[in-house]
Amino acid sequence: MADQKRAEGSTRQGRLAPPEWLIGGLRPTPAPIPWPAVARAAIALAAPLAVGLATGQSAYGALASMGALSGVIGDTADAYRMRIYNIAVPQLFGALGVTVGSLVFGHGWLAVAALTLVALASGMISSIGAVASVSGLLLLLNAVVGAGLPMPGPWWKAPLLLALGGLFVLLLSLLGWPLRRTEPERAAVAGSYRAAAEAIEAAATEAYDTRRQALTHSLNTTYDLILGRRAREHGRRGELVRLLAQLNALIPLVEAAPAVHLRGWGVDSQIPAAVRQLADAVDAGSTAPVDPELPAPTTPAERALDIALRHAFTVVHHPDPDQTNIDDRLGRPAALRIRLRRATRNVLLSGASWRYGLRLALCIGLAQVLVSVVPVERSYWVALTIVFVLKPDFGSVFARALMRAVGTAGGLLIAAAVLAEVPRGWWDVPVMLLLAALIPAFSAKGYAFQTAAITPVILLLSDVLNHQGFELVMPRLWDSLIGCAIALVAGYLLWPESWHTRIGTRLADAVAATADYVDYAFGSEDDRAERARRRRRLYRDLSTVRSEFQRALTEPPPTGPRAAAWWPLVVAVERIVDATTAARVRVNHGAAWPAAGEVREVAEQLRELARGLRRSENLVAVRVRLSGDAEGVLAPLRQELLSARSITSPHP
C-alpha cells in the first residue's frame, strides 16, 4: 500500500513538473572552469577601465572594455593561430558596425533603415562558419550600440577604442605562444588517443556509444585544428608533420574499435592501457623506442586491433615521421582564395542564408520602428536582445528566448546590487575584475548562465558612459522581455521552417550517404585512404545530425516530441556505420568476403529507408527479410539494419 501511494505521488509530481523541452536548457552543463580564460577576461576588461580613470577619460576606458568584452566572447580556440582569426577578424567587423551606428545616431528613420540593412548582411555572413558567425554578431551588435549610445567624436575614435580593447584580449591570449607554439595541437592529438582508449575500454558496455561519439568529436576537432594550420603554413614543418602522422596512425585503431564492440565481449586491460601510454608519449614528445606488452590476438577483430596498435607505437615513438605517410584522412582545406570565393557564392545563392538574413532584418527593423514610435529609454537593449536570441548557431530560438529572459533576470539582480551599493569611480575596477572573471566560467555552463554573467558587465559599462546608476536596471528587464517577444513572434512563429525543423531530411541524407559508404566499402575499388575519408565525413555528418536533433529536443511541440520519437533511429544509423566499418576490418584480417548480392541488398534497404524518411512525418515500422550467411561478415550489419527499419513513432 505504501509503495502504491509513493508511486501515485510520483506520478502526480511528474504531471505537475514542467516538460523537459522547457527546462532542459536551464540545467548547468558539467564543465571545468577555464582558468586561463578567466584570468584573461578579468585583466582585459578591468585594465582599460583603470587606465581611463587614471587619465580622466572614463568613457574611453569603458569603450575599450566593451571591445575587450567582444574579444572575450570570441576567445574560444585553443590553438594560437586560431585565436588570431577568432578575435582579430571579428574586431574589424565590430569596428565597421560601430562606425555605421554612430553615423546614423539620432537620425530617426535613417537609423532604422541602416540597422535593418546591417542586420540582413550580418545574418547572411553568419552562415559561412564559426569566425564569420562571430563577425556577423559583432557587426550588428556594435552597430546597434553605436546607434543607441552617443559616442565620443570624431567618428574614428569609438571604433579605434573598441578595436584596441579586442586586440588587448588577443595580446593576452598570445603571451604563451613563444613557449607553447604547438602545445594546443599536441594536446588535441593526445586527447584523441585518450578518447580512443576510453571507447575501446567500453567496447562491451552500454557506455560504448557515448564514448564513440566523444571520440568522433575529438577527431573532428583535432583534424580541423591541424589541417587548418597546415593550410596556412606552406611546406612541411617537422612538428606538424609529426603530429599529423601520429593522428593518422590512430585511424586504424578507431576502425578496429567497432569490430571489437560488435564481437560482444571486452578487451584485455593491457590494450586501453597501451593506448593511454601512447597518449602520454604524444603529450611528452617522447621518441624513445618502446616495445608494447600486448596479449596475443585470436580473432580477426583482435588481430586488427593488435596490428593497429603496434603500428601506432612505431609512428608515435619514431624520431623522424615518414614524409610519405602524412596525407590527411579528410582532405586538406582548399586555398584561401578558393574558400573565399566558395563562401561568397554560398552566401549570395543560398536560400537558407537569405531566409536567416531576412528573419534577422525583420526583427531588428521591427524593434527599431517600435523604439522610434514608442519612447523607450536606452532603446538599444531591445535590439541587443534580438541579436543574441536569433543567432543561428546558438541553439533553438525558442529555448534561447526563454534562457535569455531567465539569464537577464539573474544578471539584473547582480547588477542591481552593484549599481545600488558600489560607488562609481575606482571601485568599478575591482568590481569589473570580479564580474569579468565570471564570463568564461559561466559561459561553459550554458547560454542562460553566460547571459547572467554578461548582463551586469554591460550595465556597469553603460553606466560609466551615461551615469544613470540604479535607474538602468528595471528598464533593461522590460527591454529584454520586449526583445524576446519580437524574436519569438517575428523570428520564430512567422517562419514555419523554424518550428517544423528539417530533421527528417537531414537524417535521410545521412542514411543515403551510409548506403554509398556500404557500396564503396565492399566494392571493387580498394583505396583505403578514400574509404577512411568517406567514413570520417559520414561520422562528421552524423555528428551534425545528432546536434540538430539535440537542438530540436528543446523546441516545444510538435518539433520536440517528434525529435524525441526519431532519436532512436539516429542511434541506429550510427550503429549501422559502426557495423559496416567492423565488417570491413574483419575482411581485411582474414574473414570471408561477402557476396555482391548481400551488399546490394543492404545498400538498397538503406536507400529505401532514406526515401521513406523524406516522404513521411512519422516513423513507420517496416518488416523486411534479408538474405545472407547467418555467420557471415555482414550478419551484424543486417541485424542493425533490421533494428533500424523496425523503429516506429510511439503512439500518443
Image (cartoon, rainbow, N blue to C red):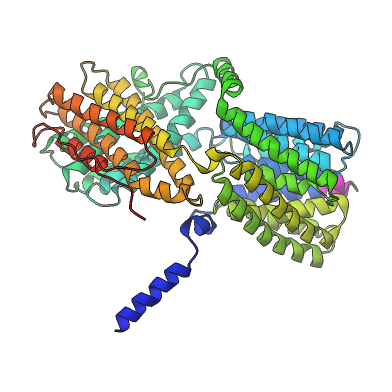
Question: Would you identify the image quadrant in which residue 146 lies?
Answer: top right
- Give the residues in magenta: 50-59
Residue ID at (53%, 38%)? 497
Q: Residue furthest bottom?
A: 1
On-image quarter of the N terminus: bottom left
Q: Nearer the viewer, residue 549 or 462?
A: 549
| Res 619 → quadrant | top left
Residue for point 37% across, 18% down:
323
In front here: 164 or 487?
487
* Residue at (45, 27) in percent of width and height: 239
Front residue of this view, candidates 92 and 47:
92
Q: Position of residue 451 (x, y in %)?
A: 64, 53
Residue 232, horizontal then vertical, whole percent: 54, 21
Q: Please name the residue shown 24% across and 46% down the image.
A: 203
In this view, 303 is above or below 26: above
Residue 354 seen in render:
yes
Q: In this view, does 62 lie above or below 509?
A: below
Q: Quadrant of residue 165 in the image?
A: top right
From the viewer's side, name the closer residue of 620 and 535. 620
In the picture shown, does residue 513 fall above or below 450? above
Residue 636: % across, % down = 17, 38
- Determine the main secondary structure of the stretch shown in magenta: helix
Task: Give left or right: position of 554 versus 293.
Answer: right
- 30 part of magenta stretch: no
In x, y percent, where is residue 363?
A: 69, 40
